[in-house]
Image (spheres, rainbow, N blue to C red):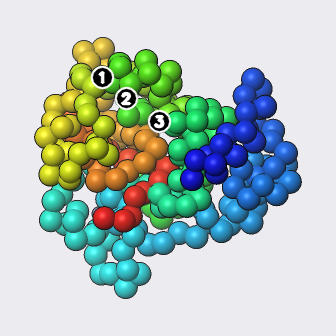
Amino acid sequence: MLSRLLTITRRLLPMQPMRHLLPSSCVLCGQTDREALCQPCRQRYFMVRPRRCVQCAMPIPTTAKEIRCGDCLKNKPAFDATVVATDYAAPADQLVLALKFGATLPLAPLLADMLHASVQHYTERGLPLPTLMTAVPLGVRRLRERGFNQSLEIARPLARSLGVRLDPQLLVRLRDTQAQATLPNDERKRNMRRAFVVPTGTMNHVRGAHIGVVDDVITTGETLNEIAETLKRFGARRVTNIVFARTVAK
Ligand SMILES: [Zn+2]
Ligand SMILES: [Zn+2]
């Protein structure tokens, strides 16, 4: 896994100082290509769209009568919809890891491009585009450690290409919560409780808006649920999560 990550990082590293991504090979298969991701890889890993729960994007059987999964029908998340580009599985997961932990920032526009196609697919089915976008904020400590917020790096080019205004300061993270991945499922909700707030300066923008919240990965959805709950408490009309990858294994 690590060696694969290093290969991706190495392939993109010489491009780091450049504004535009001009790699000479596909980040997933290594084939020489003008694009960062070759057409066959794009087709194979991103154009196959399983039927998903409209609310949390978990794959559901094509024969399902409901548009929501059993979990969403039972637990009613605070967000209204989730759009994802792919499952969080090999090889797409390597792109997320390389962006997040390999600081391979030129990957962000590629991930945004994949998400753009998914959002388009989603709006073609009659679902509304957000009127305002933001990214899941990192806590101060984690932002200092990492030096960048990977979700914001994806959100910037995505908002630009969708023509939707992005406000990175729409929400504030009040504390550095423990990394959700380190906690058992039943403690994740408590860990996130009241972790976010809408500051006075952006309250007016949230009221009545349909907000798109960008993140890199959705797992249990507790973080995004807490954010949607916060936005709704401050008067948001609708919240759509726009997330690169969906964890499907329970
Ligand atoms: Zn390829
Ligand atoms: Zn669901």
The amino acid beneath tag 2 is: Pro
Mark 2 and mark 3 residues within 8 Å of each other at the beta carbon = no
Foreground residue, 48 or 202?
48
The residue sitting at 67% across, 39% down in the picture is: 9
- Looking at marks 2 and 1 on the same chain, the residue that comes earlier in the sequence is marked by 2
Q: Quickly name the residue at label 1.
A: 172
- Looking at marks 3 and 1 on the same chain, the residue that comes earlier in the sequence is marked by 3
Crowd band around label 2 with a 10 angstrom C-alpha radius: few (<14), some (14–19), many (20+): many
Mark 2 and mark 1 residues within 8 Å of each other at the beta carbon = yes
The image shows residue 86 at horizontal and vertical percentages of 51, 59
**Secondary element type, mark 1:** strand
Q: Quick check: can you spot residue 237?
A: no
The image shows residue 66 at horizontal and vertical percentages of 28, 75
Mark 3 and mark 1 residues within 8 Å of each other at the beta carbon = no
Residue 151 numbered tag: 3
130 with respect to 206 (left or right) = right
